[in-house]
Amino acid sequence: MKKSLQHIILEILSERGLLSKEDIVPEAIFRVSDSSSLKAVDERSFKPEYLISRTLKRLEERGFVNFEYSDDTCSISLTSIGREHVKQQPLQNPIALHPDFSFDGFYRVVMLDFGEEDRKIRDEVRKSLVSIGCIQMRSGVWVTQHPIEEFIEFLREKHALNSEITLMKVADISPNPFEE
């Protein structure tokens, strides 16, 4: 998944909270080093510190980060707008991250129970389930052969859900949607 430098910096701040500029630069360089987001940059003119400083300035202009100056240090943190932007970023597909997956003999059944007032979240969760290869068996019931426990936990945390998503690990399903 190709990520922009802005997205990488927002991820770092989201994970770590308040950081100094000196802490962000090496972490961002490390994460970008094997990313395709900088492949087009001419290596002779590549100045990572400059690119990161410029990106941080753009993020501040957009209202995503806040600079706090004290003594000789400059600390950077996400604003509420920045945190909301990070939440809206597309989810990484756990199946794409583990292409060497082999079926472990258990199906994962996901049951959704959202009220109509939570329609927007419900639709986003459904799209996420489809994107990772889940098959809808009936209204609110999805099934996959892939281990998606961490992904479901991420969805719960991202949307502050608990009882709205139920995950079951079962050995047999009848009728089996994966058999022809």
Image (spheres, rainbow, N blue to C red):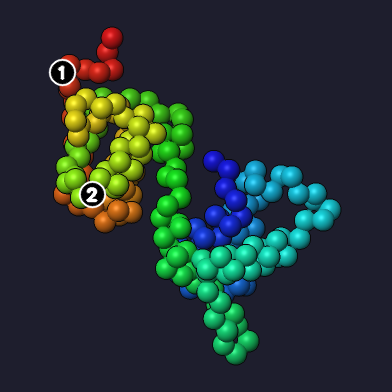
| In this picture, residue 125 sits left or right of residue 72 | left
Q: In x, y percent, where is residue 39?
A: 71, 44
**Which of marks 1 and 2 precedes in the sequence?**
2
Q: In x, y percent, where is residue 51?
A: 70, 61
The residue shown at (30%, 41%) is: 123
Three-letter amino acid code at the position of disc 1: Ser
Label 1: which secondary element: loop
Foreground mark, 2 or 1? 2
The residue shown at (82%, 56%) is: 45
Q: Are marks 2 and 1 in contact (CB under 8 Å)?
A: no
Q: In x, y percent, where is residue 122?
A: 26, 43
Q: Is residue 5 above or below residue 97?
A: below
User: Image quarter for residue 142?
Assistant: top left
User: Image quarter for residue 90?
Assistant: top left
Q: Is residue 119 above or below residue 68?
A: above
Quadrant including the N terminus? top right
Question: Label 1 belongs to which residue?
Answer: 174
Q: Is residue 122 above or below residue 17?
A: above
What is the distance, in whole Å, between disc 2 and disc 1 at their CAs? 30 Å
Quadrant including the C terminus? top left
Number of marks drawn: 2
The residue shown at (37%, 25%) is: 102
Q: In x, y percent, where is residue 159?
A: 30, 53
Question: Label 2 belongs to which residue?
Answer: 118
User: Image quarter for residue 125?
Assistant: top left
Label 2: which secondary element: helix
Residue that protrudes farthest toward the top in the picture: 180
The residue shown at (33%, 43%) is: 124
Q: Is residue 5 above or below residue 26?
A: above
Q: Does the rendering let one see residue 16? A: no
Q: Does the rendering let one see residue 75? A: yes
Three-letter amino acid code at the position of disc 2: Asp
